[in-house]
Image (tube, grey):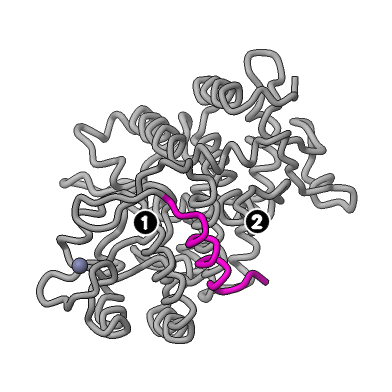
Amino acid sequence: MSEDRGVVGFTENLLTILDEGRFTATYKFAVLLGLMDLCLERSTESGSAPTSVTTVQLAEKIVSLYWTHVEEFDLGDQKVVLTQNNTGQAEIVSLIRDYRSRARLGPGALLTEAKLADGEGFKALLRNVEWKLVEMPLPRLQLVGTGALPFIYQIGWDESISKREFNGPDFHNTLTFIANAGDHLVQLAGLLRPIIQARWVTLVQQFNREHLRDSHVAEFLFGVDRTATLRLLPDLRELQDNRCFYCDSRVTAHPEIDHFIPWARYPDNGIDNLVVAHDRCNGAKKAFLACSDHVRHWAEKLRRDTSDLAAIAQKKSWARHPERTLGVARGIYFNLPPDAKLWRAGRLFAHPERAVLTSAFNLAVPRS
Ligand SMILES: [Zn+2]
């Protein structure tokens, strides 16, 4: 059952488990997006996925995925916390909400601020979320009907695991990817992410249908918070000497903050992924990947500005994780087909240039 049937077989199986109705919460989608992000972030020098990840790493991703979902959703006449389960609230959502209220974190609190607010409490939150993942979705995700369909990962426990076993010395927290599943997740991330997000949105709409008439639910769950990034604009603009990252001419009116790796490809608000650009350059780039020369320029900038970026991130309590940001970039760029179209300027596109990309990533901050 677990042999590799190539990327088409992998995709078929994935679509099958997305349709499987066994889940009463949105965890399935969170786990899939979390695994995809971990594979991108931890890609090797050549852009291959890691062979395994741990439940600890996954718990951290899951908390970051749900972090903004637990905020109140504005319906105009009232505000509600969206339900992510068909009976009551999903436990992981409740755990995050409880932590946020205990740590006195107000609306819009960033994850970076949350970790600082109560380090021990945050660790406990991660541990509780990890147990929920071990207990619920991980042993069930690859079940279809009455049978098992293991094609993404193997784990050393099943649905009968107890909390005592989880806390015991014999528990191995590894998810080992089956065959090329990790690489498939990296290669297909651009396609699968919007599909998984759309399914997640649909389920949340079903769970909350008594509240939701129209919706900007998709925007609320997965959109970019542009007001939050605006607080970095003055500092990033100064750091770029008031020049547009893409065309290098001066920015006079309407500067914008662009996500270098597009948000639709991988939602990364880390400061290393943010560049200042003209509204017209940003508008032309849209959700395209930038061309190899821009990647080289970006890598040079990250190396040159590393201490300045660190200082701005600290001053603004903003997330910074250059290794992860670069890992994602490598995972995406090294898996592009040779005839991919990458945005250069205006309506100009270019194919990837492997040599330029390789030297750019060699130049960038080394992995520890
Ligand atoms: Zn420009």
Range of magenta residues = 352-368
Would you call the spot at circle 1 few (<14 residues within 10 Å), some (14-19), or many (20 or more)?
many
- Residue 208 spot, x, y in % from top left: 34, 33
Residue corresponding to mark 1: 291
**Depicted 311 relative to depicted 124: above or below:** below
Residue at position x 79%, y 37% in the image: 161
Residue at position x 30%, y 59% in the image: 225
Q: Residue 91 or 304: which is nearer the viewer? A: 304
**Depicted 186 relative to depicted 8: above or below:** below
Q: Is residue 70 left or right of residue 170?
A: left
Look at label 1 and name its amino acid: Cys
Name which quarter of the figure residue 35 lies in.
top right
Q: Residue 54 or 189: which is nearer the viewer? A: 189
- Residue 30 spot, x, y in % from top left: 52, 41
Q: Looking at the image, can residue 93 be seen?
A: yes
Q: Are marks 1 and 2 in contact (CB under 8 Å)?
A: no
The answer to if 298 sits in the magenta stretch is: no
Q: Residue 136 or 328: which is nearer the viewer? A: 328
Q: Residue 227 or 259: which is nearer the viewer? A: 259
Look at label 2 and name its amino acid: Thr
Label annotation for residue 44: 2
Q: Of the two numbered discs 1 and 2 on the same chain, state the one appearing first in sequence.
A: 2
